[in-house]
Every structure is written in C-alpha cells, then in structure tokens.
Image (cartoon, rainbow, N blue to C red):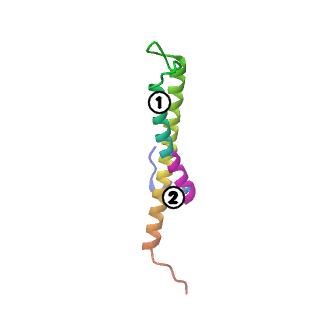
Amino acid sequence: MLHSSRDTARTPVTRLSRPVAWFLLAFGVWSWFIWITFVKNLAKDASGLAFDDGDPTAYFWVHLLLAITSFLLGTAIGVIGLRGVRALRRSAQEDAVTPPVSEG
C-alpha cells in the first residue's frame, strides 16, 4: 500500500539507538559466518550421523532446516540493524547541515 505525504506525516517513526543498531548488524554478520560454517561442516560429516551410505539422514535434514531458518532470521535481523545504522548516519548528517535555530 502506498502512502501519500499526508499519510506519512501521521505515521510514527521508530529509531533504533546506535548500540542496538550495531548489535543487530553484528548479529546478522555473525549469523552468516556461523551458519554457513555449520552447513559446510554438516556436509563434510563423516561420523555417520548426517549420511548413511551416502544418503542424507533425518539428522541431516533437520539440521539443514535449522541452519537455513537461522540464516534467514539472522539475515533479516542484520538488515534491520543495517537500516538502523544508515538512518542514524542520515540523521547525523542532517543535523550537521541544518543550522541551529536562534530564538529571540
């Protein structure tokens, strides 16, 4: 649904604090690293848990689904953090450009 400028004037704006935005971004990056590494290790598993005579087992499918879900959620959280960091930078630039209003 598209909003006109009148509609957006009534829409409340929520901003993340700088520490929260960076935490969410770091969590997203960590999620990419940890879950991609996990799937690589799962694919190389030689213990017999993930593969039975070369065929994937239920253990493999459950853990692959867990990894994909966690990867997607981590990506979404990281995107929220990235958008928060960008919004904070934009507002800091706008504050630096806007001259202070003098009263009197």
Is residue 11 visible in the rendered image? The answer is no
Main SS, magenta region, reads helix
Q: Residue at x 47, y 41 (%)?
A: 33
Which element type, helix, strand or loop, lies under badge 2? Answer: helix
Q: Residues within 10 Å of mark 2 (few under 14, many from 20)?
A: few
Per the rendered image, the range of residues in magenta is 17-27
Quarter the C terminus occupies = bottom right
Residue 34 location, x and y as percent? 50, 39
Identity, as a three-letter code, of the amino acid under mark 1:
Asn
Q: Is residue 51 magenta?
A: no
Identity, as a three-letter code, of the amino acid under mark 2:
Ala
Do callouts 1 and 2 mark residues in contact (Cβ within 8 Å)?
no
Is residue 75 visible in the rendered image? The answer is yes
Tag on residue 41?
1
Disc tally is: 2
Task: Judge depth for marks 1 and 2 and give the one in front.
Answer: 1
Q: Is residue 25 magenta?
A: yes
Check disc 2 and report the residue beneath it.
9
Residue pushed farthest front? 47
Q: Residues within 10 Å of mark 1 (few under 14, many from 20)?
A: few
Residue 99 location, x and y as percent? 45, 77
Using the numbered discs, state the Cα–Cα distance from disc 1 to disc 2 in whole angstroms. 50 Å
Q: Residue at x 54, y 20 (%)?
A: 59
